[in-house]
Amino acid sequence: MSQATSKRLSFLLLCTLLLVGPAQGKSPLPAPSGEVVLTVSGEVGLTNVADEAHLDADMLAALPRERLTTHTSVTDGPQTFEGFLARDLLDALHAEGETVTALALNDYLAEIPVADFERYDVLLADTMNGERLTRRDKGPLWIVYPRDDHDELQDIRYDYRWVWQLYRLEVE
Amino acid sequence: MTRLRAVPSYAVPSLVIVALTALLAFALVRLFQVEQAMRVNVDENMLWVVTQAQVASHRLDQAVNRRALGNSAEDPELRLDILSSRLTLMDDGPQRRYLAAEGLEPRLDEALARMQALRETITTTPGEARFAPERLTPHLDALMASLNRIANRVMMAEWESTGSRLDTYRNSLEKVIAAIAGIGLSGAILVMLLVSALRQRRAAQRGLMAHRDRLEEEVERHIYRYRQAAEALAHALDRERGVSEFYRSFAAMVSHQFRTPLAVIDSGLQRLLRRHHQFTPEQRSERYTRLREAVAQMTRLVESSLTAARLDGKQVEPSMGRHSLSGIVDHLCRLQSEATGTQRLKTQHGTPEPWAWCDRALTEQVLANLVNNALKYSPGDRPVRITTAREGDRVICQVTDFGPGIPADEQPQLFERFYRGSNATGTDGTGLGLNIARHLARIQHGDLTLLSTPDEGTRVTLWLPAADTREAGDEQP
């Protein structure tokens, strides 16, 4: 409970920074202090390295946490994921675009309509069944659709958008 | 007969349609199942998964070799992690089951073991030596060989599966097409049967209508016959009524009018019986003569009463024809002159010749009555004038005498039965003559009128329908 409260506080802090930031200068987003987990480029409102947003684990952890339990097309039984919503991330970075190109460490690439994030609670998961995703498995991040909640998502045309080993998003 | 044949002719195509619909439903379910299988089939992805694992292994091989050549930007650890991720995916539930079904589990286990060996080599060896190709390559070669076998087999398995799925698909599709064609054919047969049934029904309706028309004609014919019979019956009843009216009328006349002459005859005979010895033969002879006259008068009365009763009972049927009225008058005057030797009758005929449409005998009877009356009720030295003429669509015959005439107040009653004018007292008469004459004129669609001036004379006019002057027919002179 106290951990959740502190996370909530740090998110508020981030938000304050983000909101107040633009008035202070060209680099309103603080520089990442740890290893960069996710890079967001393209039509992004807030940046910290060149015209990109480089985010480390702490900065991502400041986003509201969400939990989602669903089946996947490559595993048996329901899996419980934790992470943050894709639309929360884009909102926090003032990113505006039609399409997001997701890139994976294994050079996999998928184009995802931003509308998906608005219509569904699409999760960028960093945890599966309580265990942190590593790059030896599907980490650092796995795009997870709430497949069990919407019948139309049980379709191979959505399956290819489940990008794992995600490390970069390009907003267009 | 038609019914018995109609039932199976409809039943067979209907049963065929039901059977074919069942077949169609079955085939559609099969198609749906194929579609579902294609949609949920995770294994579709398997070739991609294996290929990506192969790519990851080659990238690791490449990174190791480049690192050995001194390119420190290459990161074999990252490449190993990515390869691990690929192999872990293949080790997951659905993927592992697929590979097991294809007998590839030993190959997968071999690959996983080699990967574990690579990781151990890299993590346990210190320094740059941990990336030495001669340590890593044997494991990597074995791993790539296993992945090659797996990819090879998976490709064939997928093609097999796709082929068999296409077979099922085509089979189901053929069934669907056959069922639809069968249903269409049966439907066409049903429609043909329906059309032929409708045509038969229309023909039957036409037949029924024709039959109905014939029946109506028949009924009308019957009705006409019955009406004729009814009319004949009514006519017979009329005649029957007429006969009974004749008897009633005759009986009434006999009871009222015959008593007086009979009483006269009876008293005359009694007087002769009682006092015949007091009479001279001349007196007796004179009384016998008066009695005979009374009997003759009674005979006339009987004749006239019978005629009147016959008229009352409508027993007199005029037989109409085309006759010359002047001819009838001339014939009558000749007979009268021959019978009585009188010279008093003067005739005068108008031109053109008046042809009448009448019954000759009845007309003669009427005119004889009128002429007799005129002779009887006018002085013996005065003539009786008889004229004929045509007036419009009627012909007339006027009989005029120059007698004492009839008082005006008596004239309307002259045609009543048994009425006798005050001037007639003293002359013998039945009181029936004029009444019968008018009746006879009227049943020939004519009439009889009388005009009399006291001290000047009386004129009686007979009106009859005119016949065509030029027409040649059964005319008589």
Image (tube, coloured by chain):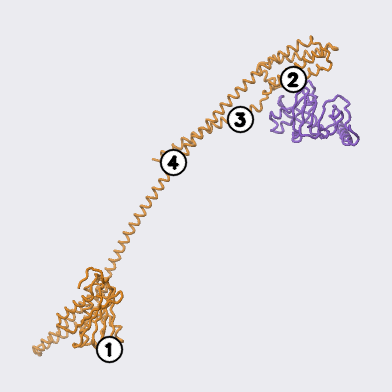
Q: Earlier in the sequence, mark 3 or mark 1?
A: 3
The kind of secondary structure element at disc 4 is helix
* Sequence-first disc among 4 and 2: 2
Residue under disc 2 on the same chain as residue under disc 3: yes
Q: Position of residue B226 (x, y in %)?
A: 32, 60
Residue picked out by circle 4: B196
Q: Earlier in the sequence, mark 2 or mark 3?
A: 3
Circle 2 sits on which residue? B86
Image colour assigned to chain A: purple
Which residue bears the numbered disc 3?
Answer: B32
Labels 3 and 1 within one chain:
yes
Q: Chain of mark 2?
A: B
User: As shown in the figure, which amino acid type bears the numbered disc 1?
Assistant: Pro
Q: Are marks 2 and 3 in contact (CB under 8 Å)?
A: no
Q: Quadrant of residue B80?
A: top right
Q: CA distance from mark 4 to mark 2?
A: 72 Å
Work out whether mark 4 precedes mark 3 in sequence or the reverse, and give the earlier one. Answer: 3
Q: CA distance from mark 3 to mark 1?
A: 131 Å
**Which chain does the orange colour mark?**
B
The answer, for residue A78, to whether it is visible in the render is yes
Mark before the other along the chain sequence, 1 or 4: 4
Q: What amino acid is labelled 2 in the image?
A: Arg
In the rendered image, the vertical position of residue B227 relative to residue B138, given as above or below: below
Say the numbered circle drawn on residue B454.
1
The N terminus of chain B sits in image quarter: top left
